[in-house]
Image (cartoon, rainbow, N blue to C red):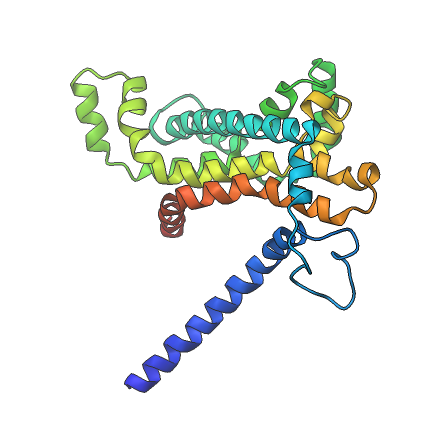
Amino acid sequence: MTGKLLAVKGIKFLFGLAIVITSLFPLAWMAVAGFKGKSEVLRSPFQFFPDMWDWTNYRQILADPAFVRTLWVTFAGAVVFTLLSLFINSMAAYAFARLDFFWKPLWWVVALMPMFVPGMAILITSFVVVSKLGMLNTIAVLIIPGLASSGQMFFLRQFYLNTPIAVEEAALIDGASRWQIFTKIFLPQSKAPFVVMGFGSFLAYWNAYVWPLLTVGDNPNLLQMQVYLAGFRSERGDDWGLLMAGGTIAALPTIVLVLIFQRYITTGVRIAGMK
């Protein structure tokens, strides 16, 4: 039995190792390719490591004011978008989980409907709306339209429904207002789901391409990272090593956030699996 158990554990370990290698290989290759020259990245036969490690591509891309500005503008926008999204959707989730108001079941259905509508299906109509509102080429057009999220509301509402009603009733008896209950009781216990939902919001903003291209494509001061990288070839030609260096630096913020909040992400995913 012991030998059989060890064999099962060994198979699980090898399977997990294969998944890790498969997942990390593209990222590792991109980072290493940043140390290669123009002719080395796509050289045949394939060679993973460069003939000589050279930091020129990383120094050059970091010395580019347009890249650095785009990196900071995108990061700042992603942080603001994430915080506002969590705040708005958590309030809506609390209202649907704990408050009673007129036609609540109907409004809950209406709130969930966007979850089943593909974003590309309403892309043109969304563009017309923000254009009529005069929001084009502003930071607001990148942040405001996507703040309300049916998925976040649904997930947080399910989480809030598990909070014992007795705790809330005791707070009401002690004279606490609904706002105090929300900020003092519900928000402090929401760290794990907030990290999971917040990381999803951050990634959605950071990886956005079509919407920024349509709405702020003419404003170099609001250029977003994915749009910058997509237009890299037309501006820099076939300098693949420089592009790989830029892509690696652009991936670092999300990697760092995963490493910082991995404990909460694991907890949040486990909570989601119990719903």
Q: In which quarter of the image is the N terminus?
A: bottom left
Residue at 27%, 24% in the rendered image? 184
Specify the quadrant of the image occupied by residue 140. Answer: top right
Residue at 53%, 35% in the rendered image? 202
Residue at 52%, 31% in the rendered image? 111
Which of 216 and 175 lies nearest the eye of the viewer? Answer: 216
Q: How many labels does the image show?
A: 0
Residue at 72%, 34% in the rendered image? 228
Specify the quadrant of the image occupied by residue 104. Answer: top left
Q: Is residue 269 visible?
A: yes
> Residue 218: where, in percent of width, then height?
78, 23
Q: Can residue 119 be seen in this view?
A: no
When the figure is inspected, residue 201 is found, relative to residue 76, above or below; the finding is below
Which of 64 and 78 lies nearest the eye of the viewer? Answer: 64
> Residue 209: where, in percent of width, then height?
69, 36
When the figure is inspected, residue 233 is found, relative to residue 22, above or below; the finding is above
Which of 36 and 110 lies nearest the eye of the viewer? Answer: 36
Lateral position of residue 87 relative to residue 129, left or right: left
> Residue 85: where, in percent of width, then height?
49, 28
When the figure is inspected, residue 272 is found, relative to residue 129, above or below; the finding is below
Specify the quadrant of the image occupied by residue 65. Answer: top right
Lateral position of residue 37 relative to residue 204, left or right: right
